[in-house]
Amino acid sequence: MAIPLLIGITFISFLVIHLAPGDPTELIGGDDPVQLQSIEQLRKLYGLDQPMHVQYLGWLKRVAFLDFGRSFQPDGRPVLDKIRERLPVTLLLNLIEMTIILMIAIPIGVRSATHQYSAFDKITTLFVFVGFATPDFWLAVLLQILFGVHLGWLPMSQLRNPMWEYLPFWKQQWDFVSHLVLPIGVATFGGLAGFSRYMRQSMLEVIRQDYIQSARAKGLDERKVIGKHALRNALMPIVTILGLSLPGLIGGSVIVETIFAIPGMGLLMVQSVFARDYPVIMGNLVIVATLTLVANLVADLAYGLVDPRIRVGRRR
Amino acid sequence: MSLRIRGRRAIGVALLAALAGGCAADGDTAERPTVANATPAYGDTYIDSLLGDISSLVPTVTSDGSSHAVGSLIYNGLVRYDRNLAPEGDLAESWSFSPDCRRLTFRLRPGVKWHDGAAFTADDVVFTWQTIVDARVPSPYKADYGDVERVEADGPGVVHVYYRHPYAKALASWGTWMLPRHLLESYVREGRIREAPQNWNAPIGTGPYRFVSRRAGERIVLVANPDYWEGKPNLSRVVYRVIPSQATTFLELKAKGVDSASLTALQYKRQTDYPAFKRAYNKYDYPSNSYTYVGFNLKDPRFADKRVRQAFAYAINKREIIDGVILGMGREATGPYKPGSWAYTDEVKKYPYDLDKARRLLADAGWKDRDADGLLVKDGKPFTFELLTNQGNDERKKIAEIVQSELRELGVGVEIRIIEWAALLKEYIRKRRFEAIVLGWGTGFDPDQYVIWHSSQTGPDQMNHIGYANPEADEMLERGRASCVQSERVRYYRRLQEILAEDEPLVFLYFRDALPVVSSRIYGIEPSPNGITFNFTKWFVPKQLQRYTAG
């Protein structure tokens, strides 16, 4: 089922990208007359003079053998190389970000639920929604100005000091970490609202259940009631959402990557779209589409694993 | 309690200071030598910024600014342009044309070595040409060599280039960077030039800096070439940081994370005018190599009438546009040549802002009556047109808006449409489906602009997209490109400028100034018509001001 779906996705993507006016050769040169004269030859070289179905079938045939082709950019590098080069950074950033978000959001959610309508609940609600509503490009620049320009405490762009190669080993590590603080801080602040709210909601539902009452009734410590019995059940929807955010982990955030000059997937994708670099765009889409399909599948299976009712229902 | 309040207030003050855009304390306390008594010294690292990563360091296939910035320190051409935009020998010691201008002979500088120690010879020159014109090499510069019949090495130190007919840009085209034959020949022969390691990790040139390392999307490190034929450069290392956001580059500049950046007019005039910034950086301005214009589709009968175009030229206030759009940081254009370049003349018809003259010219052309909206009417149709420009260029958008309001005063309605760049080119410009446009043209070192103005260049994919045709202009363009004698060519191009100013096929607006700033610890910068980087190898940091001494 997944394979035809994937082909369908690639077909529509291919169509949409090629229907967008302009092709990669047109963007070469800009207002330089010499370069503009060479366009026809380049178009032939890239096979852009062929009809679209020929181009698509050719592409599909190659992709079946995992050959994503070469970039249309002047560097002409294999698409997979380009993606491989950028993926680790985005993955690292997003994994750290996700971990921090969960570490902050889950306790906030739990406490907000157990102390519903308390001052803590209200303040954290306000806090996470301010985070949700703050445009990240704005916050990013303000933090850069404060911590980078005025206080000089943190580096404000890229991942390493320009003189990184000439630093001693432990300084290199510290340098790398300090470069991550601002981008991860900005992304985390914006992402807290979702998970903490889900957590709060699902916890509220769970602690009203009868089995929590009985756990309390048999004299269990309140910490154990919440931390063990309630939390485990309340985490179920979080696990589902986590599975669905898997494609997002490799997608990367365009805004954060642009402002902080981080060479990740988001930046690659946007630059490829502007340059009409078809092979890179398609390669990226195939990977994200595949991951989304896989994530859906995993989420479906996970439901069965964590919720006995679904397993039983299927057996009938 | 009181402590807590004070703490909070302190944070508030810090935030306020940040928001108000005040300035960081300046850590530089070292005594600054004056320009006169500063002694050149070797050392320090120069940190520059790039808006995008390089696409390749094999220069025949690159067209992006980043690759060119980095490549210019790694490679040399046969000729280059000096401070006054006059050609001078680079890897060629001298050159000469045959009397019929069809043979160009270069004498190469002896003793030049590639970074790997191999000798640079005439074979490398022949190879570079073969690579560019090879059908499997995606070079955007092929058009420059279309008229070359053959290139011959005459011993290791002499190269003859034979042209089918005289080609004016011949000399300029050999400013192209030379490629090492001994490293790239096998790749070119197999049509795999883009797979050569020289593209990203190991470019070998003859230039003042050698490639050290690169981190994709992050930075490129170069180090001074001790054997450079012009002498070892003073700055020992150059680091390029890739920062895709101009706003971030600007903040890095303020925090001294980069030594140089190109500013926008707003940043240059308004946001860097405080003492700490002025102490830390020197600002420069010189005219850039491109001009902005309002162009008309001359196939449209309304614009085919010269009087209409002249009327618009009188009605569009160039000074106001320069002041309003780029805060005065530009020079009025009187034609397609940069003020200060050898072909330029300002003795042409000019169009000072004059609404009455504009009205009279339009009336002569038959645009007299007005309709209920106050628009001029001819044959029952009101004078309205669509003005297109590309998305993402704030400057051009503002120009379109100013033109709109100025022409409205004349009784002409203008509608502005902003279209994404690739779409604009393909669907509107190439297909000639536009009425008027705000765009720009780059001007190279050579004044030959045959492809832009000649009447034979109006086909669908060609560059005379406004459809300009004037027999005398054609003649000047043909004569100008068929000669290799500068004193003759000057005459043709001066006449061409007169014709263009009279015909006004475009309203030439302005040459924007390039606005670089460079850290004030760097000495030896000499602003010139050719910008500031032409003598980069002579820049230096006096010993006591050197900042990056590790490594």
Image (tube, helix red, strand yellow):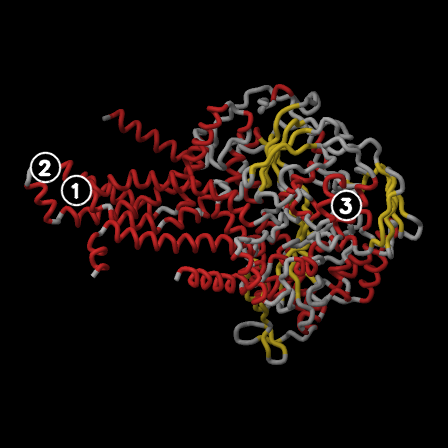
**Marks 2/1 same chain:** yes
Residue that numbered label 3 is attached to: B128
Residue that numbered label 1 is attached to: A229
Where residue B270 appears, as percent x and y from the top left, is: 53, 41
Chain holding disc 1: A
* SS category of the residue bearing label 3: helix
| Corner quadrant of residue A144 | top left
Residue at the image point whose x is 68% and y is 49% from the top: B192
Q: The residue under label 3 is which amino acid type?
A: Thr
Where residue B115 appears, as percent x and y from the top left, is: 72, 32
The span from disc 2 to disc 1 (Cα, nearest Å) is 10 Å
Do the residues bearing badges 2 and 1 touch, measured as CB atoms within 8 Å? yes
Residue at the image point whose x is 54% and y is 53% from the top: A68
Q: The residue under label 1 is which amino acid type?
A: His
Compare residues A297 and A132 and report the one nearer the observer: A297
Q: Would residue B472 appear left or right of B526 to someone viewing this image?
A: right
- Most distant residue in the bottom direction: B380
The span from disc 1 to disc 3 (Cα, nearest Å) is 74 Å
Q: The residue under label 2 is which amino acid type?
A: Leu
Residue that numbered label 2 is attached to: A220
* SS category of the residue bearing label 2: loop
**Marks 3/2 same chain:** no
In the image, residue A241 above or below residue B534: below
Crowding around mark 2 (Cα neighbors within 10 Å: few <14, some 14 to 19, many 20+) is few
